[in-house]
Image: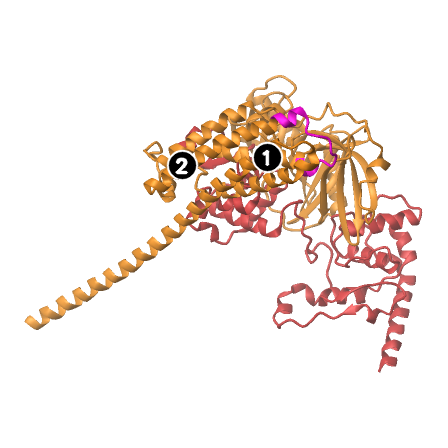
Amino acid sequence: MKRRYWIAFVSVAVLLIGIGVWGYQEHQMKKAVVIQAENHYQQAYHELTYYVDSLEESLGMSLAMQSRETMRPQLVESWRLSALAHAAANELPLTRLPFNRTNEFLAHVGEFTYNTGVKTTNDRPLSTKEYKNLQKLYSESMSIRDELRDVQSKVMSHHLRWMDVEWALNGKKQNQDNQVIDGMKRVDGQATDYTNSFSPENPRNVVLEKKHINPMKGSLVTRDQAVTNLKKWTNLPHAEVRKVSETGKGSNVPAFEIVLRDKDRSLNASVTRRGGHVIWYLFERSVKNEQLNLYEASRKSETFLKEHQLKDMVLTKRNKYNHVAVLTYVLRKSGVRVYPASMRIKVALDNGEILAFDQTDYLFNKYDDVPVKPKISESEARKQLNPNLKIQESSLVVFQNPLLKNVLCYEFFATRANDTYRIMLNANNGDQEKIELLRE
Amino acid sequence: MSKRLIRGLCVAILASVLLFQTGEAAAFSNRVIMRGDTGEDVVELQARLQYISFYKGKIDGSFGYGTYWALRNFQSQYGLKIDGMGGSQTKQKLLKASQYNRDFVNRNINEGNTFTYYGGIPLDQQVKKKAQTPSGNTSNNSGSSKPPQQNQGNYTMDNLPQGYSKSDLNLMANAVYGESRGEPYIGQVAVSAVIINRVADPRFPNNISDVIFQPGAFTAVADGQIWLTPNDTAKKAVMDAINGWDPSNGALYYFNPDTATSAWIWTRPQIGKIGKHIFCK
């Protein structure tokens, strides 16, 4: 009797010890992983502060220099540091915190230094405007550096952990006392002032992006009108309306989002509230085989353009995948291809049906005011090209550069061995706006 | 030994010449081909252009820029309209100016050999046999036994928009599947579009993988669901998004209102709702 009791007791004890050992090992393992993650965050943050530190110094040094040539190495250094700082900032668990504007600052420094120090080929000194921008970036870098340093010292002295930040941000009670988050919010507040005072030519500044959008023509339309427009546009007069909703205040252009159903297929679309323009639509169906080739598909899309009175569009890009073709058309205005005015048409290669259409760029980009008279001749522009390139084709085009500015360019298609390049040279000053190695 | 080879070759060439004199119409199909096309007509076009030294690239059946310039140069030298398209006139001229040994070209494509097809050089000097890979490789390849046919997908072309790599695409498909596999198709396109919008936005990293792996950005990354194998729907949705469709209308964030734990996300200006997700700026 006693013996049996003992056996039971020992086996339970062994089991408990086993669970204990296992649990301890698991705990240790988890601790190791957490420490590793924490160290990674710590490293990223220290790198960020270090790079912003060096960046501030570098910007300050460029302010003291005279010609662009002497300034160039310093600007390139700032460019490099901004890229490194940006990378470090994006390794922090701050996606949920509007720490965004520090990133925006770093992106501005990157764009500015690239445009003034790397891209520009001439040697005139910085313009007053550029110099002012540089000064602004410099003073901004100082305050951001101070705030980052402040958070850093708090983290060090209070033994704060980034893992807690991550948990706090993912939790519901975001406003709980967390010194790191408070510090980061302060950094952000600083940067807001700066963003607002920066000149409107801010590169890709989403805050200002609305201003870049072409205002829609026409009057406000009702839901029913929007649906009617869409049915007419897609040539589906009998389709059933599944859902119509209005976009919220976050959208750049107020629009209706419409879902239609036609013969067991659904169609999603967006129609602007002003003017009732169909921005895009997308049919949902699978395409199992291929009967048409690209040329035949392009005939279908050209018929579509004609039916919708979209004139002077030229085919510039074709992609074929999964038995569909996506054809990109671009507006040609007095012989100049206007790349920002583009639209895409998706054709099913089984029966030639237009599966999807998108004219976001064509509708929303501004391109009416672009001058089409070049300041330098084509032969002058050609001199900028590498003599090893064989030019196959050249034309005048309007190109929207990363600053969202429309620039008139000479576009050269050139080959070297088996590679094809597209080179855009600014038709006013000869700057190289873009070079592409075409992989089609 | 080599004598016999040469004799065999002569017979082959003679036969092919005879073949073309009798049945030129049997060559090219009568469809117009253009840049971006793939298939047997393109193989023939490339081979013929190479025969008369206009085309120096690989004969692979995909009509890319290399083939395009070769064709344009051919058209300009032969007094044709320079449009870079394989229309009937161009094909007629090309048939007259060149020869095409279909068997030779198709065999080498199927065997995966490195080869060229220049006129005036013995064909056996233009082939470099592919090193034999471990067996089993060829058996998977359904196209290896029969000649490739047009439009059967034997010729794959990396038809990705400029700036995207195959691995970007796969990674995005993984993320989209992990994040939104229960959502309607249009919702999956919208999730893909959010990833692309973030890449373009200066406040986020500027490449696909950094955006996806940014700490805290996507729950599928945090809980490991990103490593599930994506289905075709997710892949298609990604392709539609990188080709320009954005059902999110410019959104940078999205969340599921039923499961969202962050209070901050509710403060973002909303754009619209697709499936279970609310998209916002």
Q: Quadrant of the N terminus of chain B?
A: bottom right
Query: What chain letter is assigned to the residue under label 1?
Result: A
Q: Residue at x 37, y 53 (%)?
A: A33
Circle 1 — which element? helix
Front in this rendered view, residue A48 or A257? A48
Q: Secondary structure at mark 2?
A: helix
Residue at image position (36%, 42%) is: A156
In magenta segment, residue A126:
yes
Q: Is residue A1 left or right of residue B185?
A: left
Q: Which chain is red?
A: B
Crowd band around label 1 with a 10 angstrom C-alpha radius: few (<14), some (14–19), many (20+) = some
Considering only vertical position in the picture, is A376 above or below B158?
A: above
What's the residue type where badge 1 is placed? Met
Q: Residue A80, position in %: x, y?
A: 59, 42
- Residue interval drawn in magenta: A117-132
Q: Of residues A425 and A367, which is closer to you in this image?
A: A425
Amino acid type assigned to the residue bearing label 2 in the image: Val
Task: Give the residue pinned by disc 2.
Answer: A151
Residue A42 horizontal/vertical position (percent): 42, 45
Q: Residue A437 magenta-drawn?
A: no
- Mark 2, Cα crowd under 10 Å, few <14 / some 14-19 / many 20+, is many
Of marks 2 and 1, the one in the foreground: 1
Q: Earlier in the sequence, mark 2 or mark 1?
A: 1
| Colour orange, chain | A
Residues beneath discs 2 and 1 located on the same chain: yes
Chain under disc 2: A
Decide if residue B85 is on the left or right side of residue A71.
right
Up-down: is A12 above or below A306?
A: below
Q: Residue furthest right?
A: B79
Please give the label number shown on residue A61.
1
The quadrant where residue B29 appears: bottom right
Percent of width and height locating residue B2: 85, 80
